[in-house]
Amino acid sequence: MRAVVSFVLFAVGLILVLGGLYLVTLGGSLFYSGAGIALIATSVLIWMRDPRARIVYALFLIVLAAWSLWEAGPDWWALAARMGMFLVLALLLLLPLHLRGRRFGPAWIVLFVVTGVTGLGLLGTTLLPDPHDIAGQLPAENANPDAATGGDDPEAWTAYGRNNYGQRFSPLEQVTASNVDQLQPAWTYRTGDVKGQDDVGEFTYQATPIKIGNTLYLCTPHNWAVALDADTGAEKWVYKPDIKTDLNRQHQTCRGLSYWPGENDASAPQQSTCSQRLFLPTSDARLLALDPETGELCADFAENGALDLMHNMPFQQSGYYYSTSPPVVAGNTIVIGGAVNDNYDIDSPSGVIRAYDVRDGKLLWNWDSGNPTETAPLDPDDPDQKYSTSSPNSWSIASADPELGLVYLPMGNRTPDQLGKYRNEAEETYATSVTALDLETGQPRWVHQFVHHDLWDMDTPAQPSLVDLDLPDGRVPALVVPTKQGDVYVLNRETGEAVLPVTERPAPQGAIPDDFTAATQPASALSFEPEPLTEARMWGATAIDQMLCRIAFRKLRYEGRYTPPSLQGSIVYPGNFGAFNWGGIAVDPRRQVMFGMPLQLAFVSKLIPRDSLGADTRTNVGEQGVNSNEGADYAVQMGPFLSPLGIPCQQPPWGFVAGADLRSGEILWRHRNGTTRDMTPVPLGLKLGMPGIGGPVITGSGVVFMAATVDNYLRAYDLTTGAEIWRSRLPAGGQATPMTYLDSEGRQMVVQVAGGHGSIGTKLGDYVMAWRLTQ
């Protein structure tokens, strides 16, 4: 035993000395090299049977505790990463090692006392308030009880965000904070659509069903459309389009269907088929019109029910363009954008936004952010008429205000994301923004940009939420949009002007040759931007991988938010996964507050010169990894900033739930969200605050439903305080936004799609699940 303990201490100490000295040469902490020396000295003394080994180690524990508190403060998870491994090694030294002298002599007692006090002190920090928590309450009163919620039936859910306002708010009040614990499973449906061997890595279930009459409609990753009885979950019909797998796609997903209720004007010509319509975007770049009653294609729409979205595209590489989000239907117009693969080729399809007639599929207008003033429709049959190459796209969900006649587009960036020299002036204007277009003409009415000269893939990822705010100067028609960088912008949706203050802050400089960085960047008064990273905020399961993360941090370029891309590699924080992503936020239009799930997860972006890209380098297998940027001077490597053990290098928490008052911009509560239950070999539900993707739904009773995190649960929260008040285990990852409705007997149902997410590693499945209150 003595030899084993001596060897372990020596080996760990040698690793810490060598790594620690390298860290020092990078300008990092002296502690790890000093800790290694202490362990080696202890090891030698144990080998010599010298009882002073325990005294030396006890002194080291005292220094360790003082250093840890000085660097991390009373933060349990930060302290545990620094102290845990060394306390375990202390237990080895407390074993009978047959050192000279009495087995439990003074040296043993000293080490026992120091280890005990240090360990109890560490455990004691769990009783202290969470330093990352904000305890408070949102306003409980309904500031605007008659607030507009989209203008349709309060019991309906007819679009992705319930309606075109994108609030993800339902007025239903049967399920309350006092009875939510009585929710029980009502039914489960299996779609049968599962990942195949030839599917891309990001195979994800992100669908939110819509409800028309007493039928639920949803789509699956392979773009099947499914109709279910809203009471029982019984299958009514399934439509399976003939879509081939394509490894060129970065995503294989479908977030939802869109619905057209039919002609409002009885004197208007009636459709020969499908008096009402569902619209299904597909991963092979088509828009399909389906009959809600039968699931059959509507033959008088486009070409026998199918519209080819590749028309007039300047480049038509297979798998480089497709729509993952449901289009907006406003009146008899359907507006659709699409996703363009990030960083595959500088010559890619256009990010054009197009409007079609829902009845026959005729192109009404096209707005191309690379040529934004020419919105007259191109001739789909003229091969010489082309949209702009690789122009900024809108891949997420749009919103619309029919009274103002505007559609609101969350805009992405031009590919390549990290290389700005290929962009024209118009693309620079509309990239990474929210843009309001006239519903009749497609002409831009206003644009509000969130990142200037975006070099970080900070696409505006989420659907804007429309809400009227009562401010001191009167009621303002507002638009609320969260961003990847953590800012939440509150704008006047009629003019695009800021409702909550927006300022310009100096930004880091030093782009690569032939490029530039903007001198300043916008910042919203309402922001979930995390504190800047430091070496002291690096983390790990052991002191060794924490040291390796510190080394990696020192080797990478990091000067705060908007550190430019570089050849050495730059830290992007928050990462391009976002503080917020497509799941967005939910707003309560009556209380005029928001609920969101901000994340704090760093990514690394590294530019690779074309001539140094090895012939055997695997490229273009998704958004993460090495993407080739064909035709550019540099490829790019992107991915999360992880330790050698595959966990984030920055200390937790990585994910929160948070509530804010939209009138004042004040964040009134914030709590860790999610556990390690499904992300570790041992199923321990440690509440570190985990990342996730998906969105929330607020109900009129102040109960919020959301899954999203990397542990497989659907949760309910109290909107006022953010407290978790209920959860139900899911059979697969819940990376989709739930919805709620009344069934035919007037009972409130909550529905969640549980099918997992390929790129974040949650369990895949094919479940649609419903809950309701027990009688």
Image: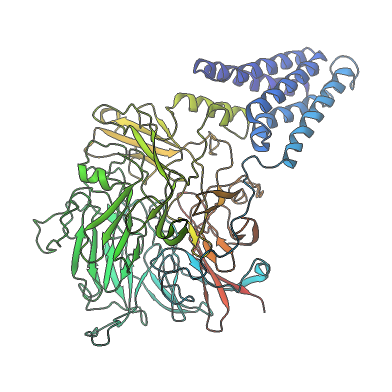
Residue at left offset 28%, top offset 62%:
336
Q: Position of residue 401 (x, y in %)?
A: 34, 66
Q: Residue furthest bottom?
A: 267
- Total numbered badges shown on the rendered structure: 0
Between 748 and 692, which is closer to the camera in this rendering?
748
Q: Is residue 400 above or below residue 431?
A: below
Residue 78 appears left or right of 442? right
Residue 386 appears left or right of 674? left
Q: Position of residue 642 (x, y in %)?
A: 50, 36
Residue 611 location, quadrant: top left
Q: Can the viewer see residue 244 in this picture?
A: no
Q: Is residue 350 above or below residue 46?
A: below
Between 208 and 368, which is closer to the camera in this rendering?
368
Question: Quarter holding the N terminus?
Answer: top right
Q: Is residue 674 above or below residue 773?
A: above
Question: Quarter holding the C terminus?
Answer: bottom right
